[in-house]
Image (tube, rainbow, N blue to C red):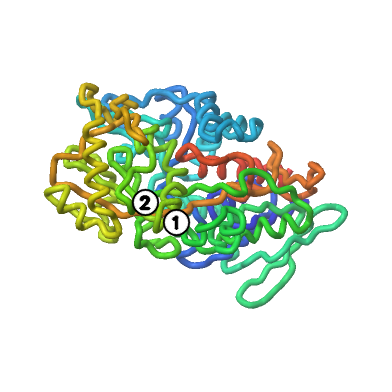
Amino acid sequence: MSKRVIVVGGGNAALCAALSARENGADVVVLERAEGELKGGNTAFTAGAMRVAYDGVDDLLTLMPELTDEELANTDFGSYSASDFYDDLARVTEYRTDPELASVLADESLPTLQWMNKQGVRFVPIYGRQAFKIDGRFKFWGGLTVEVSGGGPGLVDALTKAAANAGVQVEYGARVLSLIAGDNGVSGVTVRQHGVTREEHADAVILASGGFQANTAWRTQYLGPNWDLAKVRGTQFNTGDGHQMALSIGASPAGNWSGCHAVSWELNAPEFGDMAVGDHFQKHSYPWSVMVNAEGKRFVDEGADFRNYTYAKYGRRVLEQPGQFAWQVFDSKVSHLLRDEYRIKQVTKVTANTLEELAKKMDGVDAEGFLAEIRAYNAAVDQDVPFDPNVKDGRGTSGLAVNKTNWANTIEDGPFEAYAVTCGITFTFGGLRINRDAQVLDTDQRVIPNLYAAGEIVGGVFYFNYPGGSGLTNGSVFGKIAGANAAG
């Protein structure tokens, strides 16, 4: 007789788990708290980039068979091995990532995306955000080459369609309140749907309910002071329900509970994500800028590394500034490099032909402090090194309290543009402890029978920071594993 598997959540990790469990013979029901256009968890708000290990173009063609001869001729895709993926994950997490989980993530990234492609997920190269055209050829950088066609919403739609075609039952407006558990492990959940509470029994439960970033009280409790003031980039429904129900039956907490993925985000964005705007409140071209705080002073090395390896931790740095805001300032030499998100209507932007005029327009900034900072910065730029946005070009500054390591251009050629940002939290890093089979462990490090977890609810993979595009891949890899093992 087929096993019955319940999946809690409705985003990428949950739907991959559901498809995998169904593929392995289980009867599957997905319980998604949200309904209507709000379904899909954080996945629906992402741009859809997925970090994947590949040895070269042949591997990429298994994911993107529609690449044209012209695209292949005009693009240097390079390669990005599983060991590169693992090394980047280890480096940006300051070597705290769980080595076993990190190895599984890197090694299974390509097979998992190939499996997703067979489920109907279409992938395309990230030309617009991850490659610049130099001497007639595009060159990808930062280990990030592939995104889902249609972004996060496209991913949710493709996986939802695949689930329906496979016979997965999806229930919307179904908030899971607790796990049914006893001496033999987990045997179901208590769920409230449309005002009615009921029990749903199953042979296995997979928790894929996201982080706790939309829980203001938990943010302040675990992340610290001022985190109640951060904007939530994505769904309002990721409030830690899955964490709470698992911990209450003895699950082991793991990972960086005081850490999170947080980015530079439009200052006047709403409290939670806006599906109409999606990911475009982010402001990720800061490596070409100088970022200043209310005192007019720079406070981070904007060019420390490729954007992929710094953006997820720089939101925290913005939150630490007076008033929890900063301005990104761009010279006309680089304005053509700004990502599409800088051109949306919902943006806090000022422009000026002179720095003095710009200083007066940047609300909340000490104008004299800003002008002094820019003078010192301009004098410190090594202009003998050529600027190249495709590589870490070594064009930096020297002698400043906070030097810029790469992509340092003087701020002297108007017109100038400045954009106001605050901190936008994407997801929290603290979660449940799992093994390589996606089984949840208890505080004695023993498997809790019939309980699995995948996605942002899992702790131990990300600490302090994360390599861009690895969050979706992490959810897919361990979602697929959880589904297969829950059904087995």
Residue displayed at 48% across by 67% down: 36
Residue displayed at 35% across by 58% down: 267
Spatial distance from mark 1 to mark 2, Cα to Cα? 8 Å
Most distant residue in the bottom direction: 195
Q: Earlier in the sequence, mark 1 or mark 2?
A: 1
Residue 280 seen anywhere in this rendered image of the structure: no
Question: Secondary structure beneath disc 2?
Answer: loop
The reply, left or right, for residue 409 in relation to residue 278 is: left
Q: Which residue is mark 1?
A: 233
Residue 459's spot in the image, x, y percent?
Answer: 64, 45
Q: Which residue is mark 2?
A: 282
Residue displayed at 19% across by 41% down: 331
- Tags 1 and 2 touching, CB below 8 Å: yes
The local crowd at label 1, few if under 14, some if 14 to 19, many if 20 or more residues have their Cα within 10 Å, is many
Q: Disc 1 residue type? A: Arg
Q: Nearer the viewer, residue 365 or 246?
A: 365
Decide: is 109 above or below 443: above
The reply, left or right, for residue 7 in relation to residue 323 is: right
